[in-house]
Amino acid sequence: NELSDNNHKINLTICLLNNHEIIIENLSINDNKSRLLDACALKIQLQKDFISFFSLYLYEQKDNHLNILRPLYDFESPYLSLKETKKNYEQSCIVFKKSYWNSDFDLQLIDDRRARNLLFVQAQYEIEQSHDLYPSDIYRQLETLRDNNSFKDYLLLARTSKFYGHVIIQTCSILYPINDTKKQKLSEFLLAIGNNEIICCLTSNEKKKNQDFSFKVTRIRCWKVNWTKQDMSIALEYLIKKDTLQWITIHTEQAPLISTLLQSMVDEILAKKGGLTSPTSGSVTPIPTTTINEQTPSKVFNGLATRTESDLERLNNNDIFDKVEGDDDL
């Protein structure tokens, strides 16, 4: 029985986002994520002060490319979680990468050679993922810096790219256009999550320039993940304009991942408001789902509740919900 054999030692392969493999030896099956993270840092010779800037994630290797599945949590055994994940994603692996959203944290790492190399690997991955989404002359400059091994300059320039630090979610569907219910139809989008926003990029062949739009995290009142036999989705209660909250549903099998990413982004925003200047942990902690029964009558939009004026008066209790007058993101 693997669970009871604590003395059984294993070797575990950890990947970087360039598919480089790191072999971590002599682990116990039941070692948790923190133990493995420390072992990775020791193997890479990463300074202890920088460990909190990185974490471990489950990825799928598909078509010679890595796609994120979910973060690993502190209470998990990475070995057992990977074994279970492989039942559904045969080519899955554990990836070591940075854990934060705020790109200002890069500046605390960029002068350390080993930390800088890790940032460079991830920046290359993110630039490759977003290359077709954002036509720019920056890519040619980045190639020159990469070829000259100017990793620090590469990172400083990459940080100015639109999709730097974003997680790309493929194959999502949203009723579009958002503001015109009469013309709405279910359209395919690619999501880029980062920089305190969700950018929706229309993937249709009929795509026109500047047709992408974004949802700011500070304007999301709450969200919920929905499962049915036919569909999985995440619904965002979003401040579409002053005094108007609207439920917007994103249909995707990666709805739980989006929820986790949003929560980690919110946690980081709140930590920053609290004065923290570096990441405090490697990953977001799962939060149990809470059902709230509201006594106030509500309007209905697209089958989901839209809060009334009395609901809006309570929004000041939300520390990061930003009700900006006259700001219509869409």
Image (cartoon, grey):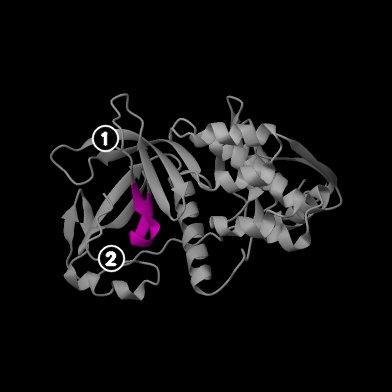
Q: Which residues are magenta?
A: 214-225
Q: Is residue 35 left or right of residue 302?
A: right
Relative to 292, say whether 101 is above or below.
above
In x, y percent, where is residue 210? 31, 38
Looking at the image, which residue is at 60% across and 59% down? 105
Q: CA distance from mark 2 to mark 1?
A: 29 Å
Looking at the image, which residue is at 36% across and 71% down? 318
In x, y percent, where is residue 196? 44, 56
Which of the 4 quarters of the picture holds residue 146? top right
Q: How many marks?
A: 2
In x, y percent, where is residue 259? 45, 52
From the image, give the main secondary structure of the stretch colored magenta. Answer: strand
Could you classify mark 2 by the number of other residues whose Cα lies within 10 Å: few (under 14), some (14-19), or many (20 or more)?
A: few
Relative to 235, say whether 186 is above or below.
above
- Which residue has dot 2 on it? 324
Observer-nearest residue: 210 or 289? 210
Which of the 4 quarters of the picture holds residue 76? bottom right
